[in-house]
Amino acid sequence: MRALVTEAWLVASGGLVLIGLLSQADAIVVLGVLLLASSGVSRLWSRLALEELHYERRLEHTRIFVGESTQLRLSIANRKRLPVPWLEVQERFATPMEIPDAAVHPSGVPRTVVLYRNTSLAPSEQLSWPLTLRAVERGYYRIGTTRLRSGDLFGFFESQREVGGRSALVVYPQTIPLPQLNVVHARPFGDQRGGHPVFQDPERVVGLRDYLPGDPMKRVDWKATARAARLVSRVYEPSRTRAVVIALNITTLPENTFGTNVQLLERGVAVAASAAVAAFDERSALGLIANGSFPDADRPIRIGAGRAPEQLNRVLEALAMISGFTTSRLADELTGRARALPAGATVVVVTAVLDESLAAALRRLRSEGHDVLVLKVGPGDWEHGAELGPIPVISLDAHLQELEDSGVMRLPEVSANALPLPPPPRGRGDTLPDPRPAASPRPDPVSTVRGRGERP
């Protein structure tokens, strides 16, 4: 019906009026006028239907952990005196976001679904729909523009418009309990006491002394100064802050193998996030290096070490955006001249594979005075493992497998059935075990940070 009601309908109605006038047939003239008036009014109504419609999309939280939910409120207001007889609202969502209280439909875009809402609006009426979004997978998800479609009362004409702009939801990666890391230092993820007296911790006051010329005024203890009737300065405990740089190797298969092992990639991201939380909780300066890129950017993922309150948020957000696409080798990111690490930093390397270049880069870092710790998230033995020398390697494969079997960790559903298998080790007749997890009922994921009362 709508296909027949086009601009030609107006021409046909005018022609009918003209024929009635020429033939002096009043009935034909009246019919033509009615058709012309109704089609004209319908056309004008359809053009004005979306005018002065104000649409708003509001997310309660823009950053959540896997397994958590956030509220999304869709609001629309008709701020004109003309009613909107019918209105269709189309919202697109990424498939890793579950909407338990609404029905969604497949769309033509991969990994997206469409939510339809149909309603009508009286003059100056406002409506809102609350929705619950539940995060199933980590990632950076865009909620695209909203498409509004409306028309006249009879449905002859329609118009559509995109409104609302774009919103983004960041789902932080899952954090997991890590076993005790037996490394050389008693506190590999914290501050080390001692060091040169030039490096002092202003949060550790060990005594008082008389003011000396050159002492900064922030060092003066004004309460002690009032009691002693002379300027008194605080004495701080010597210490040096250890910088911890998490280096995540996104490569999960040998260089001569194309593809990504999703299981090993998700393991690496979860371990990197957990190590970052542990380092930040120990009040270390935290940084991140990964041989991948941010969405819609060609620069590598690199966050300088820092102790700002939002530093953990930045690191977890970057880990949430990691995909299986690599932009370079991790060895190049660690040893490039323009990529100097903080002096004496502890480099925690999270990787599933180890090639000759990465082993050489880690040896070089250790020779330059950095503490290097390797967390191995893949199964089997490394061909170049012996080339690491005294660098400690902690294999987390058995621990991670136990977490996966118990349901604490689980692969993304959409990728669990399409995992490339790693090739067999060179020089051996046996092959590595199948990394695909056994089919089991999907549990509710748990993603909490121990010891932290607030969400980053």
Image (cartoon, rainbow, N blue to C red):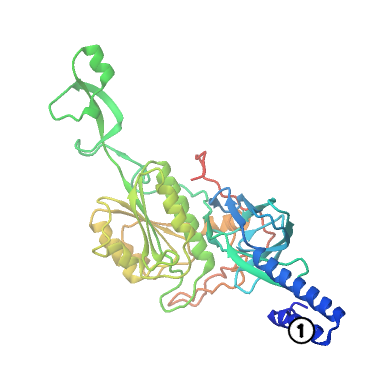
Secondary structure found at label 1: helix
Q: Is residue 254 visible in the rendered structure shown here?
A: yes
Find residue 77 and report its horizontal and vertical position in percent: 65, 53
Query: Viewer-proximal residue, 48 or 246?
Result: 48
Circle 1 sits on which residue? Answer: 18
**Point 47% across, 55% down: residue:** 271
Q: Is residue 3 above or below residue 150?
A: below
Query: Viewer-proximal residue, 110 or 446?
Result: 110
- Quarter of the image for residue 290 reads bottom left
Q: Is residue 128 left or right of residue 174?
A: right
Q: Is residue 94 visible in the rendered structure shown here?
A: no
- Quarter of the image for residue 367 reads bottom left
Q: Is residue 174 above or below residue 388?
A: above
**Point 55% across, 46% down: residue:** 448
Query: Viewer-proximal residue, 35 or 239?
Result: 35
**Point 38% across, 41% down: residue:** 283
Type of amino acid at the residue the image marks with label 1: Leu
Count of numbered badges drawn on the protein: 1
Crowding near the residue tagged with mark 1, few <14, some 14–19, many ≥20 C-alpha atoms within 10 Å: some
Q: Is residue 118 left or right of residue 345?
A: right
- Quarter of the image for residue 11 reads bottom right
Find residue 248 and report its horizontal and vertical position in percent: 41, 60
Find residue 241 and report its horizontal and vertical position in percent: 30, 42
Q: Is residue 341 left or right of residue 112?
A: left
